[in-house]
């Protein structure tokens, strides 16, 4: 089955790459991209965008822009679910669950993993949930 995801990335003060560098690398990857296994190649090219604002506003604006692009091609963009997952605090996103994951590598030699927290919550406000497909 086909699926699509919308992913947002923000910089941290010690980030080794800028968002513009990440965008350029995603637009012109050096190696073929795939999802976990080489037998799962991407069906569509990536469409990275650089947007500014609160996390919730950026997600809504990106979704609107992707809808506009699909509508121009006379294609229907499947509706995204209203749940999203993130680390840390982001303006406009409120967690309704905090998940604990023990998947942060501490030692590859001893195969030790540390814990990290992942927030889960809604990215659409109730008034944004009904979006026209015109």
Image: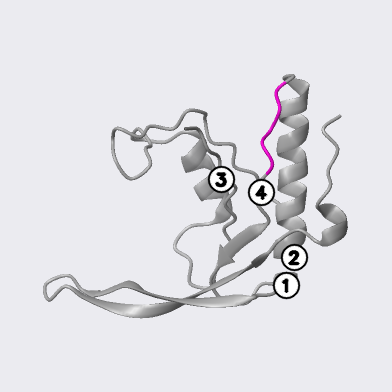
Mark 3 and mark 1 in contact? Answer it, CB < 8 Å.
no
* Picture layout, residue 40 above or below residue 60: above
Query: Between marks 2 and 1, how big is the CA–CA gap?
Result: 5 Å
* Residue found at x 50% / y 33%: 2
Q: Which residue is mark 4?
A: 50
Label 3: state its secondary structure: loop
How many numbered marks, from 0 up? 4
Q: Is residue 65 left or right of residue 111?
A: right
Which residues are the magenta region? Answer: 75-79
| Residue that lies at the very extreme toward the front in this rendered image | 1
Label 1: state its secondary structure: loop
Sequence-wise, the earlier of marks 4 and 3 is: 3
Disc 2 versus disc 4: nearer the observer: 2
Mark 1 and mark 4 in contact? Answer it, CB < 8 Å.
no
* Picture layout, residue 83 above or below residue 97: above
Residue 48 picture quarter:
top right
Disc 4 versus disc 3: nearer the observer: 3
Q: Which residue is mark 1?
A: 91
Sequence-wise, the earlier of marks 3 and 2 is: 3
Label 4: state its secondary structure: loop
**Residue 76 among those drawn in magenta:** yes
Query: Between marks 2 and 4, how big is the CA–CA gap?
Result: 13 Å
* Residue found at x 29% / y 32%: 39
* Residue found at x 70% / y 70%: 93
Residue closest to the eye, 56 or 27:
56
Q: Which residue is mark 3?
A: 5
Mark 2 and mark 1 in contact? Answer it, CB < 8 Å.
yes
Around disc 4, counting alpha carbons within 10 Å, would you say few (fewer than 14), some (14 to 19), or many (20 or more)? few
* Residue found at x 80% / y 52%: 129
Q: Which residue is mark 2?
A: 54
Query: Between marks 4 and 3, how big is the CA–CA gap?
Result: 16 Å
Sequence-wise, the earlier of marks 3 and 1 is: 3
């Amino acid at each position: 089955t086909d699926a699509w995801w919308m992913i947002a990335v923000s910089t941290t003060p010690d980030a080794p790459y800028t968002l513009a560098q990440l965008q350029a690398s995603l637009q012109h990857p050096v190696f073929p991209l795939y999802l976990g296994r080489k037998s799962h190649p991407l069906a569509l090219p990536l469409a990275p965008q650089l947007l500014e604002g609160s996390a919730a506003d950026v997600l809504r604006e990106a979704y609107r822009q992707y809808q506009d692009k699909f509508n121009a091609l006379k294609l229907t963009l499947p509706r995204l679910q209203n749940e999203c997952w993130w680390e840390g605090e982001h303006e406009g996103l409120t967690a309704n669950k905090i998940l604990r994951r023990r998947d942060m590598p501490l030692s590859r030699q001893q195969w030790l993993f540390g814990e990290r927290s992942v927030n889960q919550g809604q990215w659409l406000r109730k008034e944004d949930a009904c979006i026209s497909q015109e």
